[in-house]
Image (tube, rainbow, N blue to C red):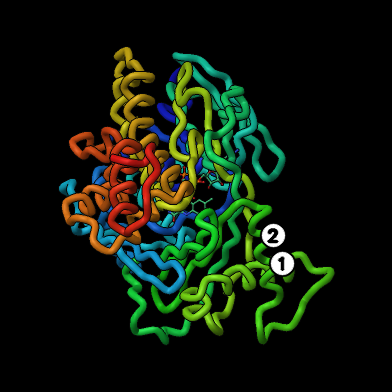
Amino acid sequence: AGVHDHDVIVIGAGPSGATAAARLAAEGHDVLVIERAHFPRFSIGESLLPQCMQHLEEAGLLETVLAADYQPKNGAAFTRGGVETAIDFREKFTPGWGTTFQVERADFDQRLIDAARQKGAEVMFGAQVTAFHADSQRPAVELRTEDGESHRLGARFVLDASGYGRVLARLEGLERDPRQDSRCALFTHVQTAFSAPDHDREKILIGVHADDPGIWYWLIPFRDGRASVGVVGDAARLDALAADAGPMAGEEDRQGDDDSARLEQRWRALIATEPRFRELLQGADLLRPVAELRGYSADVTRLTGPGYALLGNAGEFLDPVFSSGVTIALRSASLAVPLVERTLDGTEVDWANEFETPLREGIDTFRAFVDAWYDASLQTIIFHEDAPAELKARISAVLAGYAWDRSNPFVKAPRKHLDTLAALCRLRAGATPTIEEAP
Ligand code: FAD
């Protein structure tokens, strides 16, 4: 391969790495993906947004995903203290896909990377990137295989798609404090009993704790009655809630030694604090041990540097409440690929202006929505009985992942519009808004 070992090296074979590799390989570029794990491997992040479908299509991966026969998804349902409401992604302001899928990531990620290989990408599994040499012409990575061998490989461009591995954020000293509060998630997969005919499996179900808007629950249905179920909140508040709830009725008290039994007990106690979740998950069997993730939010000072760019979670990650992670990951790959191709052609690319700025615009839209979720103003809007249809459609578009559509006022100035609408909802509900809240 001349002076360069590869045209492009991609670190990580998750959704952002696989879609970037698939597109670049299909264009005839010499792409190497280096992946630490062996696939299939578990990953959290299972509920896609309709915006993902456009990016999968661009990467030539739509057929692959459609062929997998995943659980269809057309929206999000919300439940709080026995009140249920829903947002249908098909009724949205922005044109484009209105439906998507809920995917078990072990299978989804395997299919995407297999398709990238079929398009010509080379993939090394069980190889960990350990060092990086930034260079605008010839960046290089060092990797270690499971046999303990080390190699140095050069490229003309490197894409860091290492997700929670945060390879270049660490190696290039790019990490900065995320602008989100540190929260904790406890989750697992269950087998449910299909016993609730009033449960719409085509929507993700988000529960909100009746007395604490900072604690929420997810139920992501998969095919064949399986589901992903998790709870999220400030760690101390979750601790207090779990302690109050105590062991679930009918569950033996498994105090003591075993960490995984303790996590499971905690998860069961917390899930049981939301009435609808308690009802739907009665008798559900766990399909894998409960996992706990603390302080999952992350950010970097910049998304690009000499000879490299950061994709997906390797850059910024906000919060899972609106299932925006994979959407942002695919969006980042979609923005980066044409710029990588121009770089390979020898054209100067302004990565800050052409990649980072437009990518962060949509992330900032989601950030405003996440902030409005945790200060409860978005919950006020979502649970309001009669929000006008055209306003609902604008919010639906953002929740469907169309966070980059600047013709939507809730994208252009999200905070302002969310605050105004929340204040109106509070007025109509008969509550007295404060001066600051008044529209
Ligand atoms: P990843 O999917 O993390 O892939 C990175 C890959 O890089 C991995 O395979 C890893 O093994 C590999 N790697 C790491 N380090 C190295 C190394 N040194 N060398 C080589 N390879 C390496 N998103 C959604 O869209 N929907 C959801 O419902 C959702 N729910 C979530 C719930 C929780 C609790 C959390 C914390 C996140 C959730 N997310 C969700 C976010 C989602 O998990 C991520 O945004 C998504 O997986 C990012 O994809 P990625 O391709 O950037 O990275």
Q: Position of residue 209 (x, y in %)?
A: 52, 63
User: Which residue position is annotated with label 2?
Assistant: 239
Residue at (45% x, 22% y) in the render: 304
Query: Image quarter for residue 101?
Result: bottom left
Vertical relation: 269 (above or below) 431: below
Question: In whole angstroms, how far apart are the C-alphas of marks 1 and 2?
Answer: 6 Å
Identify which amino acid the numbered label 1 is placed on.
Ala
- Mark 2 element type: helix
Identify which amino acid the numbered label 2 is placed on.
Asp
51 or 6, which is in the foreground?
51
Is there a contact, CB below 8 Å, between mark 1 and mark 2?
A: yes
338 or 146, which is in the foreground?
338
Q: Position of residue 173 (x, y in %)?
A: 61, 23
The local crowd at label 2, few if under 14, some if 14 to 19, many if 20 or more residues have their Cα within 10 Å, is some
- Mark 1 element type: helix
Point out which mark residue 243 bears.
1
* Quadrant in which the N terminus appears: top left
* Quadrant in which the C terminus appears: top left
- Disc 1 beta carbon < 8 A from ligand 1? no
Residue 60 visible, this angle = no
23 or 314, which is in the foreground?
314
Residue at (42% x, 39% y) in the render: 367
In the picture, measured across the screen, residue 19 lies left or right of residue 270, that is left
Q: Position of residue 345 (x, y in %)?
A: 29, 18
Q: Which residue is situated farthest in the right direction here?
A: 257
Residue at (43% x, 74% y) in the render: 82
Q: Position of residue 35 (x, y in %)?
A: 54, 43
In the picture, measured across the screen, residue 365 lies left or right of residue 391, that is right
In the picture, measured across the screen, residue 14 lies left or right of residue 395, that is right
Number of on-image labels: 2
